[in-house]
Every structure is written in C-alpha cells, then in structure tokens.
Amino acid sequence: MTSLARVDHAYGSHIIFEGASIDFPDRGVVALRGPNGCGKTTLLKLLGGVISSSSKEVERWRQDFRAVYLDADFLTLDYLTVEEQLSMVRPLTNPPNFPKGEGCLLAGHMMPAKVGALSLGQRQRLVLSVALTLKNVDVLLLDEPLNGLDQHAALIARKSILSAGKSRLVLVATHEDERWTDYELVIRSRDALELSPTGV
Ligand SMILES: Nc1ncnc2c1ncn2[C@@H]1O[C@H](COP(=O)(O)OP(=O)(O)OP(=O)(O)O)[C@@H](O)[C@H]1O
C-alpha cells in the first residue's frame, strides 16, 4: 500500500482538495467514484502531471511512480490512419502489441480509418489498446475509459483493464453502477477519500 499524505488543489478560490490523504494499493484496478464536480478528473490530472500541483507530496509521489493520464485524446493524431498510429507507438508497448478481432479491443476494419474519423467508442478502443500495453508505466490513470463503448466492447475493455491491473495500479474514474474493479476509492469531501476492496 502506498499513501499520499496530503493533496491540495484549488481553481482560484474554488477548493477541490484540502489536506486530503489517499491510500493506494500497489496494484489492481481502483474505481474512482464521487458525484459530478467532486474532483475525479482533477485528481487523475494532478497524479498524471497534466495540471501542476502545489502539493509537495504529489510532486514526491510523481517522482516515485511513473504515472500516465489518459482520456479519449491520448496519443491520437487525427490525420493518421489507425494502422499508422499503432506503428508509431509500437516501440512504446509490450507484445502482443495490438491483437485484432473477436474478443479484442481493435477490429480489423478500424485499421485503414483515419483516427479523426473514428467514433467516440472506436477512439476509446484505440486509446485503451495502446494504454494498456504501455511499457514502463507503474500507474495508469483512466478518465471514464468505457464512455461511448457498446456493451460488448465494454466487457472486453473491463477484462483488459483488469488484466493490466495484475501488474500495475490502474485508477479508473467512473460513474458506472456496476462494481467490477478490485477496489473503490470514493471522494467523500475535499479532505476525505475512502479506499475499500469491492470483494468481486
Ligand atoms: N480548469 C478548470 N478551471 C476552473 N475550474 C475547474 C477546472 N477544471 C475543473 N474545474 C472545476 O473543478 C471541479 C471538479 O472538476 P472535475 O472535472 O475534477 O470533477 P469530476 O469529479 O471529474 O466531475 P464529473 O463527474 O462531472 O466528470 C468542478 O466544479 C469543475 O467545474
């Protein structure tokens, strides 16, 4: 278990976190939950260094763990085809790099399409395919990764995320009702985040 002793963040006078302490398991998938506007995306972006933190603890944590924040725009270049995009990032990923077909996030027919022409769900599938096989990453920070996925793709995505969580920590901001992750981290207030195992 790793802990972050103090997280603070405000947008101007709007305080999002103030002296919040957070426990993380060393690996596994953690659903980050809480109502709209409580700070889920903000927390993921602070941990991923997308927004800078005034909190020394967060900066220290970032030096100890290689963390990557991902949303639907992660590493996507709209003018490339999916195939070109995947070739570009292949050296950054572990084999088997990008399996395609039944039971996989990528479908063969997506390969020649321009990234910019993908639907939200197809784009999420591309982003997840890359994200979940990235080399040398300790913590994956996924912002609503199942957003836009149909039921079948969502099942595949959950399975793939759980499998990635066997060797690293994966934090998933989500509003899904169903419990499918290893843990839940609930943002109760600006200074109270609660980690618990889901038991599933
Ligand atoms: N760049 C910004 N500038 C000012 N305020 C911001 C900024 N980004 C977010 N906020 C505000 O901070 C609060 C937390 O936003 P955040 O996006 O982290 O919430 P969230 O829990 O992810 O919400 P949701 O469930 O709706 O996705 C919100 O009130 C939001 O309006």
Image (cartoon, helix red, strand yellow):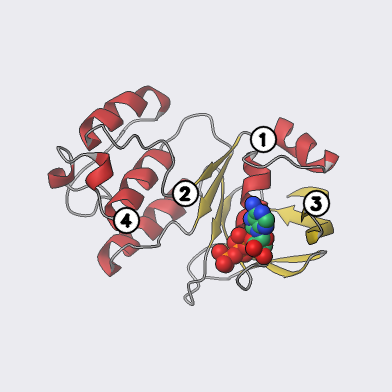
Q: Residue at x 17, y 48 (%)?
A: 101
**168 sits to left or right of 52:** left
> Whole-Å distance between the Cαs marked 2 and 3?
22 Å
For mark 3, what is the residue?
7
| Residue in the foreground of this view, choosing between 43 and 91 | 43
In the image, which is nearer the foreground, mark 3 or mark 4? 4
Q: Amino acid at mark 2?
A: Asp
In the image, which is nearer the foreground, mark 4 or mark 1? 4
For mark 1, what is the residue?
65
Secondary element under disc 1, as helix, strand or loop, is loop
Q: Residue at x 30, y 57 (%)?
A: 121
Q: Amino acid at mark 4?
A: Leu
Which numbered disc flags the more N-terminal residue, 4 or 2? 2
| Residue in the foreground of this view, choosing between 34 and 5 | 34
Q: Quadrant of residue 192?
A: bottom right
Which numbered disc flags the more N-terminal residue, 3 or 1? 3
Which numbered disc flags the more N-terminal residue, 4 or 1? 1
For mark 4, what is the residue?
120
Secondary element under disc 4, as helix, strand or loop, is helix
> Whole-Å distance between the Cαs marked 3 and 1?
16 Å
**160 sits to left or right of 107:** right
For mark 2, what is the residue?
71
Q: Residue at x 26, y 41 (%)?
A: 115
> Whole-Å distance between the Cαs marked 4 and 2?
11 Å
Disc 4 to disc 1: CB gap under 8 Å: no
Q: Quadrant of residue 60?
A: top right
**142 sits to left or right of 193:** left
Secondary element under disc 3, as helix, strand or loop, is strand
> Whole-Å distance between the Cαs marked 3 and 4?
32 Å
